[in-house]
């Protein structure tokens, strides 16, 4: 008997904990993120024309296949399948999303009990097959997988380059989801919302042969409206904030959007997370014009303020708290200035139409964002407003007999009109110069 106490986790427990809190749609998005990271490595210039990610699923299996550069044998052998991101893995130059070292494995375990992976790069190839139930049965502390086939120092044709992942023996709940038309529609909507900004650079994503529609958000910039821009850097993370107004036609899209290395992690948020009801007034449908976008960018993925499933932010993260100060200040300024324009005008609808002119809405793709986020600037509305007239009430009592005698002369329809005519009589004779 030795002195050591066995505290090693079991594979079954580890998988249960790893997959417990991740939604199926988020798991699928993790696999898409891996393909997108491959596209970034393959095309650092962000020209993704001709690259694609194809997803197909039914009650029997799930398949995701791309032509986005493939996964090298060295990466697969030493880093990609480790449970956690190795400190020895070289830090890459570029804004990638694979940070925690659990996304792909968690997604595969979440979907089913068997998976195969085939990946081809310019100079190597590998394939692997994993039966999760059999892998769990091995009670040793060797958690490694085995290559089924591997080749290095070869020259592969460009049309073969890419990765194909197939998951079979799906979990019962996954089978049920995959059989439902409602799940398919929900998945399309989810992927369209939580896409990365990379999707606007000609990278095509399809689900069961239907190309994914990508929703480009927009913000107004015109001769009348100047959006708020603030660019700063905190602890190695570049923070870019863009805020302003947009046409009111899509109130569900109002709120704050947060991106980490181009990946959407918060979508149209109107809660305390982004300051509503705390530092800024609680969200109300009258604020449907508000739009705010926060971009966190860093080569050091550990410093980005996202959670492990990339579906929200760590609200206590230093970089997020710093950004939130600017978010709150800009939101208060935008709401105050916009509401002031409306309240100080005789024709609120006309002012509304001038400020929120749909023709002035700029789509937030890579090209436009680069222009919009070039320098710091304050939010402003330059609008000639015809001041509204401020009214007050005048009320007094008079004997009915006197009021009736006066009304016989002026012929008012009611008591309110008696007072108005008397005031107008005095105004014209004693006050007005005309």
Image (cartoon, rainbow, N blue to C red):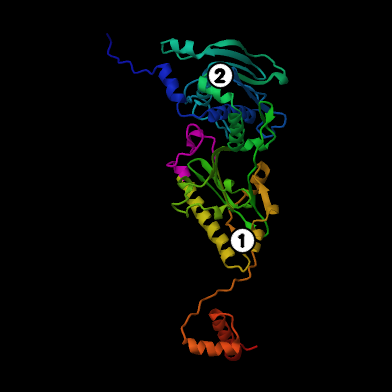
Residue reaching furthest top? Answer: 1
Q: Crowding at label 2, few (<14), some or many (≥20) Cα neighbours within 10 Å?
A: some
Report the mark closest to the observer, 1 or 2. Answer: 1
Secondary element under disc 1, as helix, strand or loop, is strand
Q: Main secondary structure of the magenta part?
A: loop
Q: Position of residue 251 (x, y in %)?
A: 59, 49
Residue name at image x 46 percent, y 29 percent: 21
Say above or below: 49 vs 140. Answer: below
Residue 324 place in picture, x, y as percent: 48, 48
Residue 173: x, y in percent? 51, 23
Instruction: Tell me which label, 1 or 2, sits earlier in the chain.
Output: 2
Classify mark 2: helix, strand or loop: helix
Q: Which residue is mark 1?
A: 381
Which residue is depicted at the point 55% across and 25% down? 177
> Could you tell me if the residues under marks 1 and 2 are in contact, i.e. CB atoms within 8 Å?
no
Mark 2 = which residue?
A: 76
């Amino acid at each position: 008997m030795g002195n050591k106490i066995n505290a090693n986790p079991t594979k079954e427990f580890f998988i249960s904990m790893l997959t417990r809190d991740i939604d199926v749609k988020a798991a699928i998005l993790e696999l898409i993120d891996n393909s997108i990271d491959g596209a970034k490595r393959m095309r650092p210039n962000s020209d993704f024309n001709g690259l694609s990610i194809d997803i197909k699923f039914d009650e029997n299996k799930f398949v995701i296949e791309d032509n986005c550069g493939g996964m090298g044998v060295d990466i697969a052998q030493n880093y990609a399948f480790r449970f956690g991101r190795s400190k020895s893995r070289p830090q890459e130059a570029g804004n990638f999303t694979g940070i925690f070292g659990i996304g792909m494995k968690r997604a595969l375990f979440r979907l089913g009990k068997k998976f195969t992976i085939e990946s081809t790069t310019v100079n190597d190839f590998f394939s692997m097959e994993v039966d999760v139930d059999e892998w769990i049965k091995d009670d040793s502390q060797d958690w490694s997988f085995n290559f089924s086939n591997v080749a290095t120092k070869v020259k592969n044709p460009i049309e073969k380059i890419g990765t194909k992942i197939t998951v079979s023996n799906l979990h019962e709940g996954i089978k049920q989801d995959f059989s439902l038309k409602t799940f398919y529609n929900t998945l399309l909507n989810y992927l369209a919302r939580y896409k990365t900004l990379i999707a606007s650079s000609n990278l095509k994503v399809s689900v069961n042969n239907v190309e994914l529609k990508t929703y480009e958000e927009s913000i107004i910039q015109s001769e009348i409206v100047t959006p708020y821009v603030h660019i700063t850097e905190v602890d190695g993370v570049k923070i870019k904030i863009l805020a302003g107004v947009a046409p009111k036609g899509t109130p569900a899209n109002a709120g704050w959007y947060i991106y980490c290395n181009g990946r959407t992690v918060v979508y149209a948020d109107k809660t305390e997370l982004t300051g509503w009801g705390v530092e800024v007034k609680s969200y109300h449908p009258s604020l449907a014009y508000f739009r705010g976008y926060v971009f966190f960018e860093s080569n050091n993925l550990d410093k980005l303020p996202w959670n492990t499933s990339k579906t929200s932010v760590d609200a206590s993260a230093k970089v997020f708290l710093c950004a939130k100060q600017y978010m709150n200040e800009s939101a208060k300024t935008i709401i105050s200035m916009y509401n002031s324009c409306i309240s100080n005008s005789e024709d609120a609808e006309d002012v509304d139409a001038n400020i929120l002119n749909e023709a002035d809405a700029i789509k937030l793709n890579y090209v436009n964002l680069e222009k919009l986020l070039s320098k710091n600037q304050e939010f402003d509305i330059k609008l000639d407003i015809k001041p509204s007239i401020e009214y007050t009430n005048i009320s007094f009592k008079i004997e009915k007999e006197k009021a009736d005698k006066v009304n016989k002369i002026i012929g008012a329809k009611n008591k309110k009109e008696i007072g108005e005519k008397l005031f107008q009589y005095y105004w014209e004779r004693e006050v007005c110069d005309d």
